[in-house]
Amino acid sequence: MSTPTLILHHYTTSPFSEKVRLILGAKQLAWKSVSVPAIMPKPDVLALTGGYRKTPFLQVGADIYCDTALIADVLEHVQPEPALYPPPLKGVSRVFAQWADSTLFWASMAYNLSPRGAAEMFAGAPPEAARAFAEDRKAMSGGMTRLRPGDAASAYRSYLRRIAHMAEEHDFLFGAAPCIADFAAYHPLWFTRTRVPGMAPILDATPAVLEWMDRVAALGHGRPEKLSAADALAVAQAADPLPAGANLLVDSAFQDDHGIPLGSQVSLAAESFGPEATEGELIAATRTHYSLRRTDPRAGTVHVHFPRIGYVLKKAETP
C-alpha cells in the first residue's frame, strides 16, 4: 500500500499539534504542512470541518480526521511501525494518554497561562492580541472549571513527579521505545519549556523528566513540506471521500448507542473544550468513531471523522 498524502492543519505553538508532529517524526513520515490561525476567524478550517475548530486536524484527500486521539489511530494504520500501541501496552498506554491529554494538560495550561505566564507569552505583542486570545479561549471553554494558578502548580508538580518515576526506569515512559503515552505526556511540558520558559523552572525538580523530554524531542517531525490553505481546499474539492470501511479507520461495523440510524442528519460536538458543532449525514458510528458526510461550496463533499470518546452525538434540530 502506498502511503497516502498526509496534510496536517496546525500552527507552530499548538501543543496538540506538537504531539502529532512528533508521531510523524517517530514514524519518519512525509507530510504537508498547512498553517492555520490560532484563534477565530478560521474560514478555511471551517470549510473542511464544518464547525470543529480545534487544532490540529489531519486531511487525507476529502477525508478529515479530527482530534489527536483519532489522528494517532490513523497514523498507526498508515505506518504500523514503530508501534504507538505495542501489544503488551495497548490498553494501559491508551488510558495513560487519555489522562495526559486531559488531566495533565489542563493542570499544566492553568499553570502555564497564569498571569505571569500569560504576560511572558504576550510580551511585545499589542494588548489587543492578548485580549483576542483570551476571548477566543473563553468562548471555547464554555462552562469548564479551570484550576486556580496555585492549585494548578501543586497538581502539575505532583504529576511531574509521577512521570519522573516512570522516566527513571526506562528511556521512555513504558519501556525502551516511545509509545502513545510519551507523545501525550510530552506536549503540555513542551509548552512550558518552549513557549513560557520563565515558567519552566518547575521542571528542574525532576531532571529525569527533562532528560526524557530531550529523547522525545530528538524524534523530530518527520519530513514536512509547506502547503497553502487554498491548495488544501483544492485537494479536497478534487477528491472523493473514501467510503466507510475503505478509509484509514480500521473498523466499520455499526454500533447504535443512541437510537439514531445511519443516514440521519446529526450534529457532533466536543463534550467540553471547543463545543462548536459539526452537522452532516451520519455515515458511520462504530465502536471507536463517528463519520459525517457534508458538502461545502469551497471544499466539496467531505467525510469528517471524530472519535467516540469525548464527543456528543445528537440528531440535528429541524428548523
Image (cartoon, helix red, strand yellow):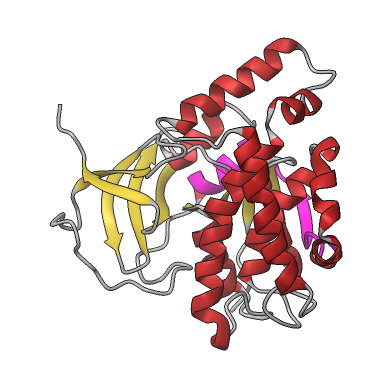
For the record, the magenta segment spans 217-237
Residue 282, horizontal then vertical, whole percent: 26, 53
Which quarter shows the N terminus?
bottom right
Out of 60 and 260, give the one closest to the viewer: 260
Q: Please say whether residue 140 is visible from this viewpoint.
A: yes
Which quarter shows the C terminus?
top left
- Up the image or down, 168 lies above or below 234; here it is below
Q: Which residue lies furthest to the bottom in this view?
A: 88
Q: Which image quarter: residue 211?
A: bottom right
Residue that appears at 47% across and 25% down? 139
Side of 108 where 297 appears, left or right:
left
Residue that appears at 52% across and 80% down? 90
Q: Please say whether residue 23 is visible from this viewpoint.
A: no
Q: Which image quarter: residue 233?
A: top right
- Up the image or down, 219 lies above or below 1; here it is above
Out of 104 and 292, give the one closest to the viewer: 104
Side of 122 where 257 appears, left or right:
left
Residue that appears at 40% across and 52% down? 310
Q: Does the magenta stretch include residue 14?
A: no
Residue 290, horizontal then vertical, whole percent: 34, 58
Residue 38, horizontal then vertical, whole percent: 64, 32
Side of 251 where 281 appears, left or right:
left
Residue 137, horizontal then vertical, whole percent: 55, 28
- Up the image or down, 91 lies above or below 232; here it is below
